[in-house]
Image (cartoon, coloured by chain):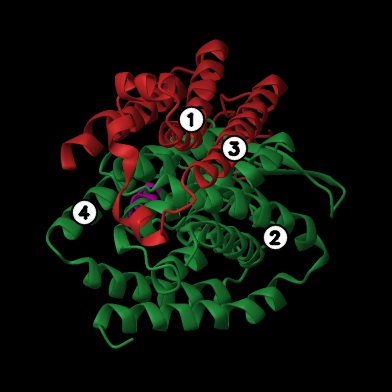
Amino acid sequence: MDLALFVVLLLLVAVLAGLVGSLTGLGGGVVMIPLLVVLFGTSVPVAIGTGFVTILATSSATGAAYVRDHLTDIRIGMFLEIATVPGALVGATATVFLTHANLASELLIALGIVLLVTIPISLSRWNVEIPPEVRQGPVAHRLGLAGEYHDRFLGREVPYRAARARPALGVMFSAGVVSGMFGIGAGVLKVLALERSMNLPMKVATATSNFMIGVTAAAGAGVMLAAGYVNPVVAAPVAIGTAFGAYLGSRILPGLQNRTVRLIFLPVILVLAVEVILRGLGVA
Amino acid sequence: MTASSDTAPVRASPAQPLPPEAYARMTLVLRLGLALSLAILASGVVIYLLVNPDLSPSSVLSNNPILSYLSLQGLGSGLAAGSVSAVLTLGVIVLVATPIVRVVSGLYVFAKVGERAMTAIASTVLVLLLLAVLFIGPLVR
């Protein structure tokens, strides 16, 4: 294949990945990483390194709007980054070691399994728009993990207070490890911790998760970049494409029913997950 | 916040809302960082294709030029010599650096409003990020 054609195809596939990732809320990496291995023939660690590029581009593209609208809780986000960043460091370092130990196929199988597990969680996510108020623990109280946001749909300010900060740190560390190992945002895990453990309203949880995903990915990307697993010729079209796709998705998403969108696209991700597992097993 | 209901905290939450400039500055950091990195990457990849019309995708995938440009010195001399790979590497570095600059911007806000615990937390996040980029990556290479 001609290199120019290869780059143009990467760009187009990245636009689709960014769009699907943003519409499903799963992030572009979930679509892009399997396709890089299956369609474009990159090695597994390079696909994962490129996954971080996808996350960084989409998180900065859509995260800026959330911060501008004060939907992102900067205190809560930065507090939890203290767990996701070391998690990502551990995960990315593990991926580099697994690659050196010739265990890239096993890594691919594990990625497929993570994708398969993510899909039912994402579908079963039973969103509470605004949770009932609960008592704050000492950590959340001392750090002032509370605030309010303007809900355009309800047309009023919604106050909230974060609870259970310490268990949330544990979930966030695991989310960081998953993110760092596989180059995916692990946003499903992050939102789960923010909504269920910390008792945050859905919109604040989504925006804050997006905010944290970028910093978590920067830690993973730092490791993979220095280890030589980010190829700039692949990364460039992927970054441009996914940023554009995610932006497009954030424009059309408000007019769509979230659950319907998930039901349409999740089979696509299911197929990709199975494909990745078969590839790891040496069947496909 | 009232202390009358039994769900209310023992004392009022110490944190005030962050100043609106903090949000504006972070939005700007994210927008500028992304725009700058995408502009560098887009021009870099176009020039790369023009300069290397005969390269095959497999040769690009098997020869990652990025490692020679990851030091400040290597990147500087690569850029000075007009290497397209160095330009592409710079674009990737700006992309990775954007959220890190965002953490610095948060650190500045917390230090300015005098929230000591949050300042310590933001500093720790920054140190961990720098550790990842500057030490752990090169170490596991």
State which region is magenta. Answer: A169-174
> Residue at point 33% right, 47% down?
A88
CB within 8 Å, label 1 to label 4: no
Q: Is residue A268 above or below residue B37?
A: below
Where residue B45 appears, as percent x and y from the top left, is: 53, 44
Q: Is residue A138 visible in this depiction of the protein?
A: no
Can residue A171 be found in the magenta stretch? Answer: yes
Looking at the image, the residue that sits furthest to the left is A101
Q: Amino acid at mark 2?
A: Glu
- Badge 2 element: loop
Name the side, left or right, on which A211 lies relative to B90: right
Mark nearer the viewer, 1 or 4: 4
> Residue at point 44% right, 54% down?
B54
Q: Are both tags, 3 and 2, on one chain?
A: no
Which residue is labeled 1 in the image?
A143
The chain letter for the residue carrying disc 3 is B
Among the two numbered marks 1 and 4 on one chain, the one whose residue lies closer to the N terminus: 4
The chain letter for the residue carrying disc 2 is A
Q: Are both tags, 3 and 4, on one chain?
A: no
Q: Amino acid at mark 3?
A: Ser
The chain letter for the residue carrying disc 1 is A
The C terminus of chain A lies in quadrant = bottom left
Which residue is labeled 4 in the image?
A94
Among the two numbered marks 1 and 2 on one chain, the one whose residue lies closer to the N terminus: 2
Which residue is labeled 3 in the image?
B43
Residue A129's disc is: 2
Mark nearer the viewer, 3 or 2: 3
